[in-house]
């Protein structure tokens, strides 16, 4: 009987658990607390956190690859959707069905603000190179500056799979912290007069413009940066489905059930790559610091472009909307609205900020395509 109990103990996870696995389990519980109690990106952080928990419970074998005809673990197979770059474009498909490109079409100048905000990506790329990271690792880390989780996951899976979970968590963490990080930067870089600037109401956008926009954008971007076609193509297909108004059931499915299904699979499998050897290292601290640097520079460059446009248009553009150039949709646009109202209660900047906000989605996808074409 004693031998049976000893064998049971020796084959249990308790006997074989390492200190790194214990630390990772504690980290997963902390992330679950932040998601459930504090509401930090709960739709993605809950599955990511639980994926971390599952993969660090010893002997579960959920990420074990198939060997000698024996099937692999459940999460190993689900992870192939992340590993092969399938889930992020599907998220973009759903995002396109949920996005109104009308403000960007009505005021195409705001595309410049979305483009300027991507400067943080390339600034972080060169800093990462200077820290002796490989070009592939540097590109995957730098894309955090776009504040676009699916894009960050897409590029990391293709260029630096071993850094995938840290990059994903950093990207979504900074997206959740947009209301904390951006306002001090916006206030520091603009004058009170600039922040009070009223913007004219956007013109109505004709339906034919809404339908042509995703088609023309797909053709133009794909010809210019072919490696961005997967993300841009899915984003614009989702938007075309929305704007056609011919398939409301598809639009509803993409905006709701399908989005949540893919999000669960993406989050769970990203978390399942988070082992102690990766997280408990100096590299993790570098990634977190570089991601924050990229995001801050992106915000700064967007606001500075807004100030330039304020000057060039004779005060017709509020430079605060430049902060929405990062593609944290629609959170960044809401932050702009909140900050604008502080200085001019009658100022309604939300729809104006949505222009650079959705331009940032396109910009981050193009930036990812450029990096992928050079280093993929």
Image (cartoon, helix red, strand yellow):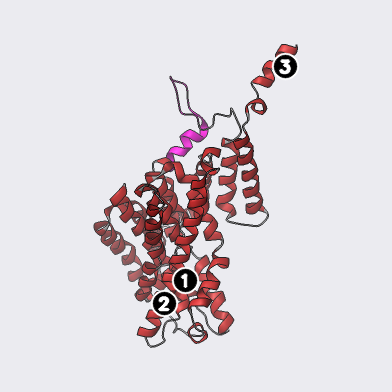
- Residue 306 is labelled as 2
- Secondary structure of the residue carrying tag 1 is helix
Q: Can residue 246 be seen by looking at this rendering?
A: no
Is residue 65 rendered magenta in the image? yes
Question: Looking at the image, do the residues carrying marks 1 and 3 touch, with CB atoms under 8 Å apart?
Answer: no
Q: Are marks 2 and 1 in contact (CB under 8 Å)?
A: yes
Q: Which residues are magenta?
A: 64-82
Image location (x, y in percent) of residue 376: 31, 46
Residue name at image x 48 percent, y 52 percent: 287
Sequence order check, earlier mark of 2 and 1:
2
Q: Identify whether 334 is placed above or below 68.
A: below
- Mark sitting on residue 5: 3
Give the number of the disc on residue 323.
1
Q: Secondary structure beneath disc 2?
A: helix
Where residue 219 sits in the image (x, y, percent)?
Answer: 26, 59
Quarter of the image for residue 180 reads bottom right
């Amino acid at each position: 009987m004693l031998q049976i109990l000893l064998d049971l103990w020796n084959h249990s996870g308790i006997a074989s658990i390492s200190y790194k696995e214990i630390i990772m389990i504690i980290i997963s519980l902390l992330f679950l607390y932040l998601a459930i109690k504090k509401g930090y990106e709960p739709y993605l952080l809950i599955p990511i956190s639980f994926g971390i928990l599952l993969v660090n419970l010893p002997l579960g074998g959920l990420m074990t690859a198939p060997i000698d005809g024996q099937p692999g673990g459940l999460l190993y197979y689900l992870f192939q959707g992340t590993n092969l770059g399938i889930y992020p474009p599907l998220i973009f498909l759903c995002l396109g069905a949920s996005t109104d490109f009308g403000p960007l079409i009505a005021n195409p100048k705001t595309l410049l603000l979305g483009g300027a905000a991507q400067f943080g990506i390339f600034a972080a790329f060169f800093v990462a190179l200077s820290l002796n990271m490989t070009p592939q690792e540097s590109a995957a880390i730098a894309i955090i500056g776009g504040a676009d989780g699916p894009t960050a996951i897409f590029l990391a899976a293709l260029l630096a799979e071993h850094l995938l979970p840290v990059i994903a968590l950093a990207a979504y963490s900074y997206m959740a912290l947009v209301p904390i990080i951006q306002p001090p930067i916006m206030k520091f870089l603009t004058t009170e007069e600039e922040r009070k600037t009223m913007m004219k109401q956007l013109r109505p956008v004709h339906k034919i413009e809404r339908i042509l926009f995703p088609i023309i954008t797909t053709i133009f971007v794909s010809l210019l940066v072919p490696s961005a076609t997967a993300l841009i193509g899915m984003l614009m297909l989702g938007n075309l489905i929305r704007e056609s108004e011919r398939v409301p059931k598809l639009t509803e499915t993409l905006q709701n059930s399908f989005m949540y299904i893919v999000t669960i699979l993406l989050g769970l499998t990203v978390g399942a790559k988070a082992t102690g050897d990766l997280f408990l290292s100096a590299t993790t601290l570098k990634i977190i610091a570089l991601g924050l640097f990229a995001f801050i520079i992106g915000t700064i460059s967007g606001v500075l472009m807004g100030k330039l446009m304020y000057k060039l248009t004779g005060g017709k553009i509020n430079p605060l909307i430049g902060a929405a150039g990062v593609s944290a949709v629609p959170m960044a646009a809401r932050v702009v609205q909140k900050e604008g109202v502080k200085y001019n209660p009658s100022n309604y900047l939300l729809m104006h900020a949505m222009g650079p906000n959705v331009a940032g989605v396109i910009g981050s996808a193009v930036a990812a395509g450029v990096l992928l074409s050079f280093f993929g």
